[in-house]
Amino acid sequence: MCLKIPVSHLYRPHDTCTSGFHCRDIDFPAMLAALISCVAAASAIAPPQVTSARTVAQHLWTTRQLFDTDIHAIVQCGSGPSEYRLAYMPCRNRGEIIRLMLEESKCSYELEVVGFRAWARDVKMTTPDGKLPCLRNYDGRGTDLCQEQAITRFLADKLGLAGSDAAERAAVDAMYCFWFSTLRNNGVSHDGEHYSVAALKEADEGLSATSVPPYEAVFRLDPLSRAERSLVALKRFEEVLGASKSGYLVGEGVTYPDLGLFYILYELAEDDNVPDFAARFALPHCGAFLDRMSSRSQLADFLTSPRRMPRYARDPSGSSTYLYVAGRASPEILEA
Ligand SMILES: N[C@@H](CCC(=O)N[C@@H](CS)C(=O)NCC(=O)O)C(=O)O
């Protein structure tokens, strides 16, 4: 038999090695060989050390360029024993909705910050898909879970952010799918064909949610510009929020698509993007939603803390420069 021991287990502090193997299944010579190779791997890969959020932030800001970051560290988030460990690169992107869920629900967790150089050299080989984000030991039996959407749904369920019954969970999931396919450009980019802050910044005067058709009237193959398509998507959220009694997208409380919409609007409202987007694009409900969400105590604490990863700049076409840039409540941190 092949005994495959994920390298990540070797440096997990709370690892309990409950892999479910039975002694009769084990081929001892193969196990010995696997252990020897694991020991070799362990000596090659230094375990990430618990490091303060400010020290990590200082490293990032002095390095400046995401692809030059060379850090592999654990940032302890929350108080009390950590329930999860999320590994991700030092940026917001695919990790942001996951972190917002953990923060909003006051869950203690470890953020395994993997700078790009450390990733390419050591850490990539420790994740099942060779990709991040990765939720370490998500099942308590030593298995690591990759794929942003799978991690999001798994944690939303665990943290009570997925809806109250089967029907509501389906409605929440549908809202999440809509968010992912529009404002997240199907996960390809945060700036793309379906939603583009760069295009919104350059939008013609007069273009607003009132001048574009409703999402349901638009065909998948459409002749719209990026700015128009972005507004069509935002207009749908505007209508849902306008019709909501609770102020949330689905049901009576915060669910994971709320957190997704929140951070997209937060980025849109940055000073170097479209800070007056609610008035300019006739999206008052989105504007009020952003204000409400920003003042929730857990989120407000996260937004102003050094444990939030910095944003990075985009060029006028919307492409990532991967150069960190300060944002609202997210200043440069040059001293630990
Ligand atoms: N489908 C995956 C894509 C993950 C992905 O492409 N992650 C990027 C970081 S955002 C990555 O790991 N890049 C480094 C690499 O490919 O080695 C998901 O949704 O999680």
Image: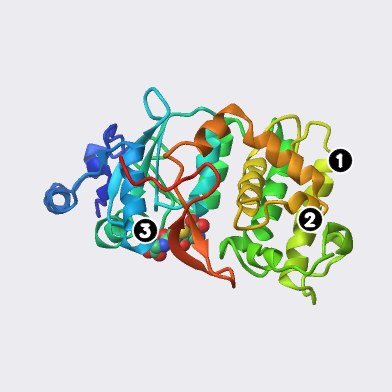
| Relative depth, front residue between 134 and 143 | 134
Q: Secondary structure at mark 1?
A: helix
The residue indicated by pointer 2 is 280
Mark 1: few/some/many CA within 10 Å (<14, 14-19, 20+) = few
Of the residues tagged 3 and 1, which is closer to the observer? Answer: 3
Amino acid carrying mark 2 in the image: Arg
Amino acid carrying mark 3 in the image: Arg
Mark 3 and mark 1 lie on one chain; the one further toward the N terminus is 3
What is the distance, in whole Å, between disc 2 and disc 1 at their CAs? 21 Å
Left or right placement of residue 316 versus residue 34 in this view:
right
274 versus 284 height, above or below:
below
Q: In which quadrant is the N terminus drawn?
A: bottom left
| Relative depth, front residue between 275 and 29 | 275
Q: Secondary structure at mark 3?
A: loop
Image disc number at residue 264: none
In the rendered image, residue 179, in percent from the top left (x then y), is placed at 68, 53
Q: Are marks 2 and 3 in contact (CB under 8 Å)?
A: no
Q: Residue at x 67, y 41 (%)?
A: 258
Q: Quadrant of residue 97?
A: top right
Q: Residue at x 37, y 25 (%)?
A: 81
Q: Quadrant of residue 153?
A: top right
In the rendered image, residue 18, in percent from the top left (x then y), is placed at 30, 34
The residue indicated by pointer 1 is 243
What is the distance, in whole Å, between disc 2 and disc 3 at their CAs? 32 Å
Of the residues tagged 2 and 1, which is closer to the observer? Answer: 2
Mark 2 and mark 1 lie on one chain; the one further toward the N terminus is 1
The residue indicated by pointer 3 is 64
In the rendered image, residue 333, in percent from the top left (x then y), is placed at 38, 45
